[in-house]
Image: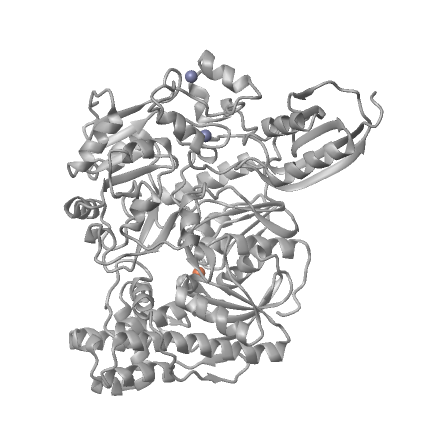
Amino acid sequence: MTVGRIARKIDVNGIVQGVGFRPFVYQLARENQLSGQVANTAAGVTIHVEGDTLQIDAFVSDLEKKPPPLAHIVAIDIQKTTPMGSQGFAIVASKGGASRATLISPDVSVCDDCLGEMFDPQDRRFGYPFINCTNCGPRYTIIDDIPYDRPKTSMRHFTLCAQCQAEYDNPEDRRFHAQPNACPACGPQVTLYDSQRAVLQDKDPIARTAQLIKAGHIIAVKGLGGYHLCADATNDKAVERLRQRKHREEKPLAVMSPDLDTIVSFAQITSGEAALLTSIQRPIVLLTKKRPEKLAFSVAPRNQYYGVMLPYTPLHYLLLSPGFTALVMTSGNLSEEPIAIDNDDAFERLKDIADYFLMHDREIYLRSDDSIVRRAASETRQIRRSRGFVPMPVFLKAQMPAVLACGAEQKNTVCLTKGRQAFVSQHIGDLENLATENFFRMTIDHLKRILDIDPQHVVCDLHPDYLSTQWAKTQKQAPLLQVQHHFAHVAACMAENKLDEPVIGLAFDGTGYGPDGTIWGGEILAADLAGYRRLAHLEPTPMPGGAAAIKAPIRMALAYLHQVYGRGMGALKLPALDAMENRESDIIVEMCVRRINAPLTSSLGRLFDGVAAIIGLRNTVAFEGQAAMELEMMADDQDEERYGFEWRDEEIRQIAIGPIIQGVVDDLGMGMPAFIIGRKFHNTIIEGCADLCAVISKETRIDKVVLSGGCFQNRLLLEGLIHSLAQKGLQVFSHRLVPTNDGGISLGQAVIAAALADGRTSTVA
Ligand code: ZN
Ligand code: ZN
Ligand code: FE
């Protein structure tokens, strides 16, 4: 044993397997002239190092500061141990029960090293669309079980050639233990088919595909987490045809563009947005359009934004290399169904949409849509959290029992907890058809398996008709808890901000089942993780036709007008009413009066819809929230005026609709332009709610305010409330890690169930 040598045992926990962590440790140890070894364990990675103190300190410092791009260190535990007099540094076999407790990396974009090789004519992987290494490539979507080793992935069908095997075995190679490692000789291949499943023989199927896209065809392209439907985004006829075939009327279509310079030619990019676009997660980022529009009108009709992403697989880079401004890259599905992942399924479901199919033989085990994010109030906001982010956990404040949370109905996700981690699934979709329900069940099974979680508690929404609720009720192996929708929204925001003390929760939303039999959605709650109390809400208004009122905001417009003016609304001169048959509006009003199929709602989302319809933006929508979105987009004005905002001081305060609707109607009567009315309406909600929160804060002595619910996808509302509440001395918390919409509900359900399972009692309920 050398004099002065000390030894340390270092345990690293987090995403440290399958991401090149052991080779990184190996290099680092050698750089610092340390001897010892590194191995995977059940909890992560364990390291034994020997050397002098300075060298070990330098090693630990670099370990923390420079981990490989896909690694995510949660904890490092360092303990003194006895030097063994080891020579050299070695990567040794996994210790103890392999890697059942470790974290799996999300799928991430191809790295620069791999791209360099792919575009190098001298490289053996020149032009190979499945190139990857320990720092990049597929992970979550190809794993079937743990430990994360090749036989447990969809790469099991491909036997490594001698060269690939040598890379895989060499700790100094950047493909050491890269499970999806492959090359043209041994790995997956692409094939181009027509819609009759006949192969188009071509020595370069990807270049041929690009030609077909240029010629105006629609191609189904198999990607990382599922199929895309692909068309030239500058070809209006092609994009229009894609919309018709996919039955997607007006919802914007995502585009993929080769690089930032090209994106700048059609959209504005801030530095924050550029960082998001180029991040290894490669999400779709909402960017403000440049005018005049350079892409086809039908890409994002009547919308201020484009959803744009950079290429993230090698195949995308090859496909875009012949010089496109942008390709439409929308999910390969019929509207409302989950994205296709299986080749036969894709042929079957997409045969009436796609002219050609660019397929490959690496199976996708778990579908994962492209994630969608935007920047608002100087932070990244998740709109749809999937590929690139999942299964990265949300790290919690406290240990949790194992809980399965089944989420909501729209934009469903599920959540499983373990220790201090909450695993929110990828976006599953709207649970309204069998295909999506199957995907829901499959995702739960899959996550349970790869995360090795056996839930001791199951939690779902209060709504009896949600398919997620019905499924949860069939689960007999664990006790079931049902949680109110808006309480779950607030708890989700608390969880990601590591709060468990009482908060004032603003849950501003579309719809959610209220325990009083009305439909909630404009709620101010006092909440902690164990319970809530309803403090204030929007004045309940009939929702004529129930769900039909979501598709036709004009129905809400009539309901609000009737609520405020009664029969006197007939005398109002409003563009929205003029456009309507008298008989039709009479029927809707009658539904409100007699309360036939017109449940009461306190939803703020519906008020946005109603106001949008009153000022004549639109009477019907092609997707939920479209009218409210248009109201937001056109209200981008500096006006500081507002309408009246009053509440009745009762045990549960009611925010009056009257002054708001009257203000809008009066302005319309005076010929005020719609964009000013829209701005004033936003100001009213923002400042009025901030005033009310200040009053509530004084009464309750709670000074933390949590913002959640689908309405906070509205940038003006989010930024306005953050600002106004802060000005009143309140601490404001909003979503950054999970969506503020119903995609975040499962996280909230999970932490509430865990708190109650731990026997916590609420101090506010
Ligand atoms: Zn790579
Ligand atoms: Zn090979
Ligand atoms: Fe909601």
Q: Of residues 661 and 161, which is closer to you in this image?
A: 161
Tell me the quadrant of the picture where the N terminus can be found.
top right
Q: Of residues 316 and 246, which is closer to you in this image?
A: 316
Position of 449 relative to 161 (above/below): below
Q: Of residues 290 and 282, which is closer to you in this image?
A: 290
Q: Position of residue 180 (x, y in %)?
A: 46, 25
Q: Position of residue 427 (x, y in %)?
A: 42, 47
**Which residue appears at 28% of the width and 34% of the height?**
321
Position of 674 relative to 150 (above/below): below
Q: Position of residue 694 (x, y in %)?
A: 55, 78
Residue 355 in view here: no
Give the left or right position of residue 709, taking residue 544 as reference: right
Give the left or right position of residue 646, taking residue 252 as reference: right
Position of 70 relative to 508 (above/below): above
**Which residue appears at 17% of the width and 44% of the height?**
238
Position of 152 relative to 250 (above/below): above
